[in-house]
Amino acid sequence: MASARQLSKSGGLKSAASRQKLKQQQPNDRGVATVPGSSGEGSSNYPYMKEEHVLTLGEHFYNRTMVLVQQAARSSKESSLWDIADGIYKDVEGYISKEAQVRAFALLMYNKGLEDAQNAETVAKLCSRLASLEAEGLKFRSPLLKQLQEDFISRATWKDNDPNRWLAFTCYLCCLFRHLKIGDNYINALVEPVFTCLDSLVTDADSSDEEMKCGCNQLKELGPTLEELKPAQMDILLNMMKEKLLGPKSSHFSRLLLLEIIELRASGWHLTDTQQQYYSEIFC
Amino acid sequence: MASARQLSKSGGLKSAASRQKLKQQQPNDRGVATVPGSSGEGSSNYPYMKEEHVLTLGEHFYNRTMVLVQQAARSSKESSLWDIADGIYKDVEGYISKEAQVRAFALLMYNKGLEDAQNAETVAKLCSRLASLEAEGLKFRSPLLKQLQEDFISRATWKDNDPNRWLAFTCYLCCLFRHLKIGDNYINALVEPVFTCLDSLVTDADSSDEEMKCGCNQLKELGPTLEELKPAQMDILLNMMKEKLLGPKSSHFSRLLLLEIIELRASGWHLTDTQQQYYSEIFC
């Protein structure tokens, strides 16, 4: 993990100053409390907050993250989202001391990831950094994963009634699977949901071009991992993608997306310059 | 090269007996002649023949080859076409002593390869074995290649007027390129014609399923070689195949053939068992 000085340099919140500022911003109707079980250094100096205040605080951290990410993108600095997330983690841990706070904060961050598919990956990375945040034995990742699994069950109704939410969910699920590891390991319970959603995005007869694009983009990132974890399932998915490519109903754009993934996978998930050039020119 | 005993065992013509039999079958209006420059052992014992007699002899060797190939296929013996071709070579060289005979024999064999696309590869292998047969400084391969190049120029008219001949020619051209080497080297002059014909077979808008199949079958065999010899040209060909696959006018069968080659090439010209299984099941 980067040191406090590094974090400060790289765009993370400057711990002492920003905590003080936040402390002034946040309502505090219970005064300063001792925080049992908090792993955050110096966390006992910070106020115990009601759930709605955790949400306000969470909004602040989310907005702050987005501003920092945009600044980093504009300035082309080398400060990465991981550095920013480290800074956010350091600041958050001082304010979280109760199980209810962890839960509220995790669900807020979870919902942020569903708001905008564009930000899904950024929020997933932030959640990944916050995953081990803990109070009273509850880790940030637990309510997050629970909600993810509940929403996975609801996905079928969204697909028909709220296609944007369905698309945002599958995108976010894939991003969380990619980034939310335990140690160096992917979370096994997510492999099946990820396959199911990707399958639906890229092989359903009525998939829109947007769904196809989202699914294929996720496959570009996740393909090697999914193949390593479940090679037989990847074979089945790829064969269904071939069927769709060969069928009469796909749009030209869909066929192009499918062909790129089929070629990518056949090439061992790494295209040559010439192969890449073909797709970048044709997609322009 | 296999020894005479091996050849006899493996289905090649038994030299002495068959020569004697042929001698009795062939018209011989010039009597026995000394054969200057013949490389065949004992060739001076055999008659000088007029061109038409060479053709009759050639027909005999061709028919004999086909019978032996069919016998070998039926009996599942390990005797290969190369062993049979060795036997034919041994027998033929005793009868060929003049430049005109070499030319007539080569053109006969060349035309045999165009008669039936099914036999194109067998004839190409036989021609490859006979390539260095020589009389009066003329090698068997010279008139063969000359005719191949002349026919390559005529191919455009065949394509419109005699599509079967065009198809047989492209198939035979590819088979000759594959087998008719000088030492270990492919004949460079044939690379461009091969690319041109394959391109036409698999990317022309009006290619029939039969043409597509012939072209893709040849690409399966020749792909690695052509890619090694002309990687940039192979990129162009593959990109055109992708265009055709993605376009609206290809039949399902054509798209399937194209996809198999695209996947094969992306996989380094070697499909995994699962990839192979997909295509063998879907083609059934």
Image (tube, coloured by chain):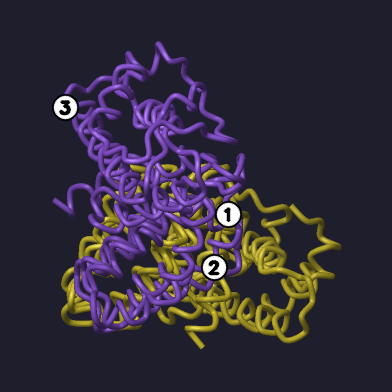
Chain colours: A yellow, B purple
Q: CA distance from mark 3 to mark 1?
A: 33 Å
Per the image, label 3 sits on a secondary structure element best described as helix
Residue A152: x and y in percent read: 26, 62
Res B244 quadrant in image: bottom left
Mark 1 or mark 2: which comes first in sequence? 1
Q: Is residue B141 left or right of residue B275?
A: right
Q: A145 or B37, which lies in front?
A: B37
Res B62 quadrant in image: top left
Q: Residue shown at 32%/53% (left/top)?
A: B113
Q: B128 or A163, which lies in front?
A: B128
Q: Work out whether B176 lies above or below B70.
A: below
Mark 3 or mark 1: which comes first in sequence? 3
Q: Residue furthest front?
A: B30
Tell me which chain the residue with mark 2 is part of: B
Q: Which residue is mark 3?
A: B74
Residue B40: x and y in percent read: 51, 28
Question: Is residue A105 at all visible to an observer of this figure?
Answer: yes
Q: CA distance from mark 2 to mark 3?
A: 37 Å
Question: Is residue A202 at all visible to an observer of this figure?
Answer: no
Per the image, label 1 sits on a secondary structure element best described as loop
Whether residues under marks 2 and 3 lie with C-beta atoms below 8 angstroms apart, the answer is no
Q: Amino acid at mark 2?
A: Glu
Q: Amino acid at mark 1?
A: Ile
Q: Residue shown at 30%/40% (left/top)?
A: B57
How crowded is the residue under tag 3: few (<14 C-alpha within 10 Å), some, or many (20+)? few
Residue B184: x and y in percent read: 61, 40
Q: Which residue is mark 1?
A: B187
How crowded is the residue under tag 2: few (<14 C-alpha within 10 Å), some, or many (20+)? few
Q: Residue shown at 37%/80% (left/top)?
A: B156
Q: Amino acid at mark 3?
A: Arg
Q: Residue furthest left?
A: B284
Q: Which residue is mark 2?
A: B192
